[in-house]
């Protein structure tokens, strides 16, 4: 997206995936978000950066787009992630439940959080159609009418204590399969910070010795 297109109604997704140690896999997932169905670069979609933590074995891919295009771009990235990441083999110190762990949608410019909630719910429906083995839970503006927070959902799901996926009860989809796990989808009215999000990015301050295992890639919008 060029600076000349400031009139766009923009939203972003901080896509949390349970992979950081295979750089090619992470970059392929990011590239999938950038491409249209014909394989050409989408003019209204950018991957702003990729933050990876090898100890956590977790990456956050920041995708920005017009609100009308964001859902399809995130969907493409998620489908690539489900094909590439196997939760039966995943290891890392950060608690996680899914190959695609969290899909938070944020308003950026000229877009309401309610509209982002609609994008998130539509994305959840598309995921169930295109990746029928995935299982989803909702929070924030995607979780109507309750609008439960991520903290509430994590407690309900035993996020930090349980990895028996089959015992989890998703909001959408069948009981979680061990390969895909359980994915959280939400929309929240929190500004996207430059490098980290309050709940969706690994903390850089809790374990300074881990710096050597962290990597931020300022990704080219061309996907090259």
Image (tube, helix red, strand yellow):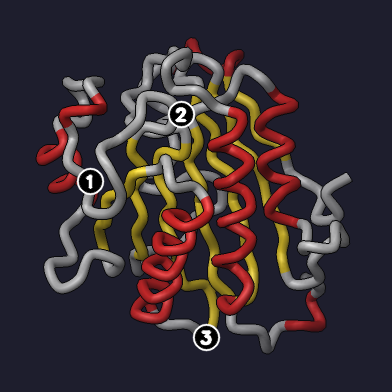
Find numbered disc 2 in the image and state the secondary structure of the residue it sits on.
Answer: loop
Q: Which residue position holds label 1?
A: 170
Find numbered disc 1 in the image and state the secondary structure of the residue it sits on.
Answer: loop
CA distance separating discs 1 and 3: 32 Å
Question: Residue at left 43%, top 51%?
Answer: 103
CA distance separating discs 3 and 2: 31 Å
Q: How many labels does the image show?
A: 3
Q: Choose mark 1 or mark 2, whichever is in front.
A: 1
CA distance separating discs 1 and 2: 31 Å
Question: Residue at left 43%, top 70%?
Answer: 122
CB under 8 Å between callouts 3 and 2? no
Which comes before the other along the chain, label 1 or label 2?
1
| Front-lying residue, 15 or 128 | 128
- From the top left corner, tell me how far across and down residue 19 is, in percent: 55, 26
Q: In which quarter of the image is residue 121?
A: bottom left
Q: Which residue position holds label 2?
A: 204
In this rendering, the answer to whether 159 lies above or below 70 is above
| Front-lying residue, 15 or 110 | 15
Looking at the image, the residue that sits furthest to the bottom is 7
Q: In which quarter of the image is residue 164?
A: top left
Question: Residue at left 19%, top 39%?
Answer: 154
Q: Which residue position holds label 3?
A: 110
CB under 8 Å between callouts 1 and 2? no
Find numbered disc 3 in the image and state the secondary structure of the residue it sits on.
Answer: loop
Q: Is residue 199 visible?
A: no
């Amino acid at each position: 997206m060029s600076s000349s297109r400031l009139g766009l109604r923009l939203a972003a997704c901080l896509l949390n995936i349970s992979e950081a140690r295979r750089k090619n896999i992470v970059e392929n997932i990011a590239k999938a978000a950038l491409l249209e169905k014909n394989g050409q670069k989408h003019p209204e979609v950018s991957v702003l950066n990729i933050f990876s933590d090898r100890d956590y074995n977790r990456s956050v891919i920041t995708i920005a787009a017009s609100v009308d295009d964001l859902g399809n771009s995130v969907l493409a990235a998620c489908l690539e992630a489900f094909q590439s990441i196997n939760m039966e083999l995943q290891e890392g110190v950060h608690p996680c439940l899914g190959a695609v762990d969290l899909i938070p949608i944020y308003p950026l410019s000229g877009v309401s959080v309610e509209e982002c909630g609609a994008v998130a719910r539509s994305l959840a429906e598309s995921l169930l159609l295109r990746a029928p083995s995935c299982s989803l839970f909702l929070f924030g503006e995607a979780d109507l009418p309750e609008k439960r927070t991520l903290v509430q959902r994590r407690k309900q799901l035993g996020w930090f204590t349980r990895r028996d996926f089959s015992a989890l009860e998703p909001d959408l989809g069948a009981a979680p399969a061990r390969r895909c796990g359980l994915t959280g989808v939400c929309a929240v009215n929190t500004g996207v910070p430059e490098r980290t999000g309050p709940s969706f990015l690994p903390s850089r301050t809790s374990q300074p010795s881990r710096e050597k295992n962290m990597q931020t890639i300022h990704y080219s919008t061309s996907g090259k």
